[in-house]
Image (cartoon, rainbow, N blue to C red):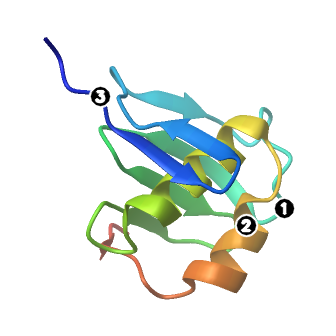
């Protein structure tokens, strides 16, 4: 039997069991300030329009923040605002 990891945030429930990578370009997302993102195995990489790609993971900023960021990325709205207001510099690693 496979284990399932689900993040619960109030009424919001996000399935954290990702298979493969999911990417979107700036044409697909309406989050101002986000050029692209890549949803990985319990993490998300975000490339900002002003430059820089950052990895957000289970330890930094934590699974609940990552779950919310993934939900916002998939919805196509609110990711940049969420990062600037809730996560700020609490990323796992700056990639470039």
- Crowding at label 3, few (<14), some or many (≥20) Cα neighbours within 10 Å? few
User: Where does residue 4 sit, x and y in percent of width and height?
Assistant: 29, 28
Picture quarter with the N terminus: top left
Horizontal placement of 6 versus 80: left or right? left
Q: Distance between the residues labelled 1 and 2?
A: 6 Å
Callout in the foreground (1, 2): 2
Q: How many marks?
A: 3
SS at circle 2: helix
As drawn, the residue found furthest toward the bottom would be 89
Q: Are marks 1 and 2 in contact (CB under 8 Å)?
A: yes
Query: Which disc, if any, is residue 32?
Result: 1
Q: Quadrant of residue 32?
A: bottom right
Q: How crowded is mark 1: few (under 14 residues within 10 Å), some or many (20 or more)?
A: some
Q: Residue 4 carries which label?
A: 3
- Which of labels 3 and 2 is toward the front? 3
Q: Earlier in the sequence, mark 3 or mark 2?
A: 3
Q: Quick one: SS at disc 1? A: loop
Dot 2 corresponds to which residue? 80
């Amino acid at each position: 039997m496979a284990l399932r990891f689900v993040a619960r945030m109030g009424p919001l429930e996000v399935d954290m069991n990702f298979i493969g990578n999911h990417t979107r370009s700036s044409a697909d997302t309406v989050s101002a300030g986000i050029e692209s993102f890549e949803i990985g195995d319990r993490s998300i990489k975000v490339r900002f329009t002003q430059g820089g790609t950052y990895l957000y993971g289970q330890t930094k900023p934590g699974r609940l923040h990552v779950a919310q960021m993934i939900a916002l990325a998939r919805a196509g709205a609110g990711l940049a605002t969420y990062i600037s207001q809730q996560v700020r510099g609490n990323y796992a690693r700056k990639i470039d």
